[in-house]
Amino acid sequence: MKALLLKEKNSIPSFSDVVTPFTGADETLVTLKAASLNRRDLWITKGLYPGIRYPIVLGSDGAGVCEGREVVIQPGVDWGDDERSQSSSYQILGLPKDGTFAESVVVNRNQIFPKPNHLSMEEAAALPLAGLTAYRVLMERCRAKSGEKLLVTGAGGGVALCCIQFAIKADLEVYVTSGSNEKIEKSLALGVVGGVNYKSSGWTEKLKERVGGFDLIIDGAGGADFSNLVKLSNPGGRIGIYGGTNGAVPNFSPQPIFWKQLSILGSTMGSPQDFANMLDFVNKHKIVPVVDSIFRLEDGAKAFERMNEGSQFGKIVLTME
């Protein structure tokens, strides 16, 4: 079969012939129709991820056909029995196991879920990892409530956009930050109330003057701006963290955390139950993930170039059709 194969560090996966995988006990073969990229895949190509092996077929997200049914793949493996956190053996499809950037993939049967009927294969492939991460941090960890004021940082990324879409359907008042005015405009078109460019001077003060403060903030960046999120939080507010693209938080003072009675909630991926709940929510509200662009599998190098540019708004999808 054909696949995108990563052969060495600091390289782009190449369109290659690989052996069609065999299924073991409790496993099944999915004939893939579409897959989507995550920033995780880009980090792996640069060697910025633990436990990398070569060669490897990357890809955590996929939709296709399994035993005559249209399905979407739950990307987590071996969450464990505790809904509060994943087990020590938890893995994500695409490393260490071969993933979805291929014509077919072997997964455990419990990773297979029915594809939402209102979504195309490309749209369904854009949903799993981002949708799962967003649903858990927003709904399960932070317990978003109708009427709350929510700030989502980094509008344009897959998780951030899913948070925005989920929160709007849950009747929250949603605001965003972005380093791109164009991405803010596109967010407004989704139903966001307002946004601010974090590259502009005094953006924190401008946002606080307009909104007053936020009951809930969802962040995937960390870094120097995290202290500004604490300033923007209302007393008793929550900050949900699902990533750290900008690295460590420098010169951070704990005083505002305890004085404002804030809760900082870490979250990553989600359990199979979270995935099922997320799909129920998507089906109920007929949510369609935002797709930035679609590339053929053989043009996978162009998809990675698009991801590396960082200018995408929504998910970058590979199609096997």
Image: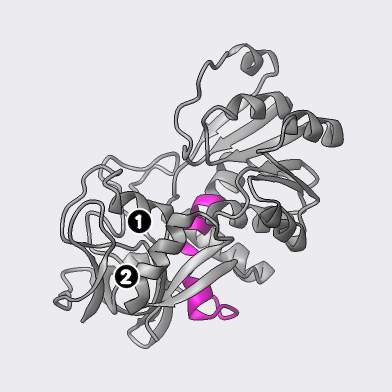
- Residue 104 x, y percent position in the rendering: 28, 77
Q: Is residue 108 magenta?
A: no
Residue at 48%, 79% (x, y): give it. 121
Q: Residues within 10 Å of mark 2 (few under 14, many from 20)?
A: many
Instruction: Residue 55 in the image: state x and y as whole percent.
Output: 16, 61
Q: Residue at x 14, y 77 (%)?
A: 19
250 sits to left or right of 290: left
User: Between marks 1 and 2, how big is the CA–CA gap?
Assistant: 10 Å
- What colour scheme governs how the chains and residues are painted in the rendered image of this protein? one colour
Point out residue 54 in the picture as x, y percentages from the top left corner: 15, 56
- 28 up-or-down from 78: above or below: below
Let me know if residue 131 is in the magenta part. Answer: yes
Q: Quadrant of residue 285?
A: bottom right
Q: Are marks 1 and 2 in contact (CB under 8 Å)?
A: yes
Q: What residue is drawn where x is 41% and y is 62%?
A: 305
The quarter of the picture where the N terminus appears is bottom left
Direction from residue 194 to residue 318 in the image, left or right: left
- Residue hosting label 1: 41
Question: Residue at label 2?
Answer: 101
Task: For residue 78, say whether it is visible.
Answer: no
- The disc labelled 2 sits on which kind of residue? Phe
* Magenta-drawn segment: 116-135
Circle 2 — which element? loop
